Structures are given as C-alpha cells and as structure tokens.
Image: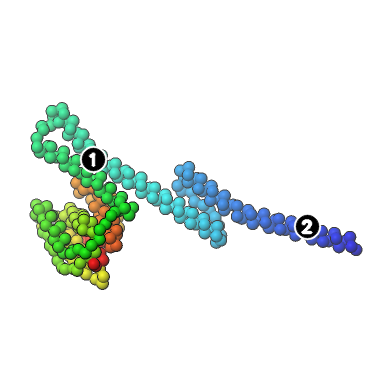
C-alpha cells in the first residue's frame, strides 16, 4: 500500500514537472519568437530593406512594442526619402547657375562672348543666386534645428510692414502691380530681422505670381493675444492640396516661374514664424488669389 502511494506521488510529481516544463517552454517560445522577429526585421532594415515590418500578433506588451518598432521604421524610411529628395533638389538648383557660369566663362575665354558690362552683370547675377541659395539653406537648417539666436522684443508691425512695401515698390511698379497696406495692430513680440525676412519672403512670392494690373495687399488685424498679418495677391491662387505643400523645401507650384528664387522662401518663413511662437497658413481668398496669414503673439 505504501509502495503504491509512493508510486502515485512520484507519477503525479513527474506529470506536474512535465506540465511545468511544457508550459515554461511554450511561454519561452512565445517570448522568443517575437524578439527574433524584431531582430530579423532590424537586420533587414540595416541591409537596405526599407519595406519589411515586424509581424507580431496579439495585444500584449510585445505586440505593442512591435507596433511602435514598425512605426519608428516607417518614420525613418520617410525621413531618409526626404533627405535624398532634398539632396537631389539642392544639386539641381546648384547645377543651373553653375552651368550658366561655366558656359559664359568658356565663351569669354574663347572670344565668342564680348567682355561687356552687361555680360559681367549677368554673371554676377548667377553668383548672387548661388550665394542666396547657400545662405537660405544655412538659415533654414539652423531654424529647423532650433539653432537660431533670436532677440525677441516689442515691435510695431505696421511700421515694419510699410518698410517692406517701400522696399518692393520699385519692383512692383516695374511690373505694373499696386501695393496696399490696410489695418492696424498693436505691438508684437518678435525678432526684427526674422520678421522682416518673413515679410520680404511673402512679398517676393506674391509679386512673383501677381500679373500686371494686379494688387498685393498687406493687411493687419488683431485677435485675443495675437496679431494677424495677411499678404494677399490677385494671382491664380493655390491649387487644391497646395496649402501645406507650398511650405516644403524647394516646392514650386509653377516651375516656369522658379528661376531667380531658391525655392526656400516660404519654408524659411514658416520656420521663422514657428521659432517665434507663431503660426502661418496658406489658402485662397474668396475673391480670388492666394493669401498667407501669419499670427504672432502680442507684446
């Protein structure tokens, strides 16, 4: 009887041990498989596979980890694609003035192009375009990285807006475009140079797309704690879906009108506005034409 009891206890213990080992093995496999899948996915990404994602089922912590891991891979792939596109755009924009410079200098050297003040001014214009592109890239990189040293102070937006309009009056007059300033607003808290750069970029963009006989209007108003400034033109307006795209680096809605600009003006304006705690958005006016509205905090 005692022997049978001992045998029964031994069998029960053995069964419990086997059951425990089996359960432990299954649990271990359940933990190891997702980790292995994450490891294989990471290795595939390292080797250049940007499309593979970790396939982990369930709703536990490992599944949530895999979901976050996949989202990270997606963001990394998008950032890499944007950087490649940026390098391509920079190379394209540098190539055009460099090609013009090279061709004209070779023509001057071979005696095919007379060395006149007119031709030298044209070459100087290409050099200025290159310098502006390099400076715009530097400024945008600093702004997006938070490396700008801004000196925020109370500024009178109306006086600075008038200063910008006067600076663009000659260009507007030559093109047959009327400039207008409307409204009033209290002091804002902003960096003077950054604010002027924003307005100049918006005015440059508006004049570029406003036809002869059109009008560019700069309007000031105020809200609760904010000053609103709108630059409106009477050009063709924005195409559907361009409201966000116009602020992308090197975006050009009309490539035929891109010559002479870096394609970074609106991207720089957005970065500077946000660096000063403001907001900017683009849209179309109900009566036609594009308008860019920025909001900056009152002083």
Percent from the top left, x then y, of residue 62? 55, 57
First reached walking from the N terminus: tag 1 or tag 2: 2
Decide if residue 198 is in sight here.
Answer: no
Q: Quadrant of the C terminus?
A: bottom left
Q: In which quarter of the image is the N terminus?
A: bottom right
Q: How crowded is mark 2: few (under 14 residues within 10 Å), some or many (20 or more)?
A: few
Percent from the top left, x then y, of residue 260? 19, 46
The residue drawn where x is 48% and y is 49% is: 52
Q: Is 280 or 241 nearer to us in this picture?
A: 280
Q: What element carries label 2?
A: helix
Furthest residue in direction top, as rendered: 110
Q: Name the residue under label 2.
A: 14
Q: How crowded is mark 1: few (under 14 residues within 10 Å), some or many (20 or more)?
A: few
The residue drawn where x is 22% and y is 42% is: 130
The residue drawn where x is 51% and y is 45% is: 43
Percent from the top left, x then y, of residue 8? 83, 61
Left or right: residue 11 versus residue 81 is: right
Left or right: residue 121 versus residue 238 is: left
Furthest residue in direction bottom, as rendered: 224
Left or right: residue 131 versus residue 69 is: left
The circle drawn on residue 96 is 1
Q: What element carries label 1?
A: helix
């Amino acid at each position: 009887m005692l022997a049978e009891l001992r045998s029964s206890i031994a069998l029960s213990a053995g069964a419990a041990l086997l059951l425990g080992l089996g359960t432990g093995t299954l649990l271990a496999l359940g933990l190891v498989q997702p980790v292995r899948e994450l490891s294989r996915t990471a290795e595939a990404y390292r080797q250049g596979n940007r499309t593979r994602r970790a396939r982990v089922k369930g709703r536990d912590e490992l599944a949530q980890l895999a979901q976050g891991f996949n989202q990270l891979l997606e963001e990394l792939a998008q950032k890499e694609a944007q950087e490649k596109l940026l390098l391509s755009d920079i190379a394209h924009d540098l190539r055009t003035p460099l090609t013009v410079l090279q061709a004209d200098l070779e023509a001057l050297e071979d005696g095919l192009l007379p060395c006149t003040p007119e031709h030298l001014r044209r070459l100087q214009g290409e050099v200025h375009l290159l310098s502006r592109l390099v400076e715009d890239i530097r400024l945008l990189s600093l702004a997006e990285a938070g490396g700008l040293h801004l000196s925020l102070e109370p500024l009178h937006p109306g006086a600075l807006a008038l200063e910008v309009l006067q600076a663009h009056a000659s260009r507007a007059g030559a093109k047959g475009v009327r400039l207008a300033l409307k409204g009033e607003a209290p002091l804002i808290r902003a960096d003077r140079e950054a604010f002027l750069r924003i307005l100049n970029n918006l005015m440059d963009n508006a004049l570029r797309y406003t036809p002869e006989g059109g009008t560019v209007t700069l309007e000031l108003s105020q809200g609760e704690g904010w000053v609103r400034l709108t630059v409106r033109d009477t050009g063709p307006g924005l195409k559907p879906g361009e409201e966000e795209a116009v602020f992308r680096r090197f975006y050009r809605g009309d490539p035929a009108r891109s010559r002479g600009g870096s394609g970074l003006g609106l991207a720089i304006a957005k970065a500077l506005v946000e660096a000063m705690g403001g907001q900017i958005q683009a849209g179309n006016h109900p009566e036609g034409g594009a308008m860019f509205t920025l909001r900056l905090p009152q002083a």
